[in-house]
Amino acid sequence: MQNHEIENNAAPAIQHPTLESYGVTVRQTLTTPTKPGKKPRPVWIVTGNVFGLGELFREAKGRKFRGEWSFFNDPCDEILAHLETNGRQSFAEQVETSIERKLEKAARYQSYAANAEVRAERSAEKASTIGGMIPMGQPILVGHHSERRHRKDIQRIEHSMSDFLDLCQAIS
């Protein structure tokens, strides 16, 4: 009877969920720098059941590398807190966030293309302005005081036109 009373009076052990209970494993390792003289940095690798956690990992500045998520700061507490409060994203939510990211990327690249068009137009105008100063068919007057400037202007025109062509290829 006394043993039974002792067992009943014992406080039940409070089970706190861990990352392992969610199927997520985190291990710490070091980077392997390729540049000589660069020191290895600690990195945390997250593997296991990471389904529905991609958005959290991106917000925590994680990077996906060879099917694993890597972090330069320990993400354990943040992942555990998120799983306890919010849980995982459903597949539909994951698809929705993926589409949103792709739309943001498309808008970003459209702005890059618009900037490239402006730069291309400026390069073409610059080449045209420089070329307009040289009379049509004017040879380089060797030994004349204008020889150096004429050669420099031709180099500037070639450089501006090559920039223009490069930007036109980048746009298309």
Image: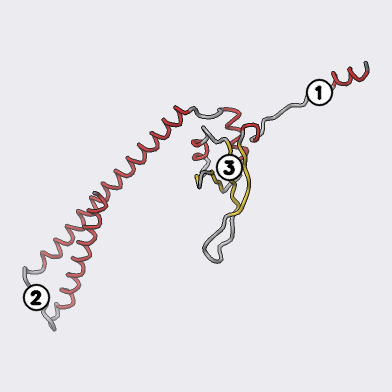
Asked which quadrant contains residue 96, the reply is top left
In the rendered structure, which amino acid carries the disc numbered 1? Ala
Secondary structure of the residue carrying tag 3 is strand
Q: Mark on residue 11?
A: 1
Q: Mark on residue 111?
A: none
Task: Mark 3 or mark 2: name the one nearer the start of the chain.
Answer: 3
Look at the image and tell me in which quarter the N terminus lies: top right
Residue 29 in the image, given as x and y percentages of width and height:
62, 51
Report the Cα–Cα distance between label 1 and label 2.
Answer: 100 Å
As drawn, the residue found furthest toward the right would be: 2
Residue pictured at 64% horizontal, 35% vertical: 19
Q: Is residue 147 above or below residue 25?
A: below
Colour scheme: secondary structure
* Numbered disc total: 3
Secondary structure of the residue carrying tag 2 is loop
Residue 92 in the image, given as x and y percentages of width and height:
44, 27
As drawn, the residue found furthest toward the top would be: 1
Question: Badge 2 local density, few (<14 within 10 Å), some, or many (20+)?
Answer: few
Q: Mark on residue 139?
A: 2
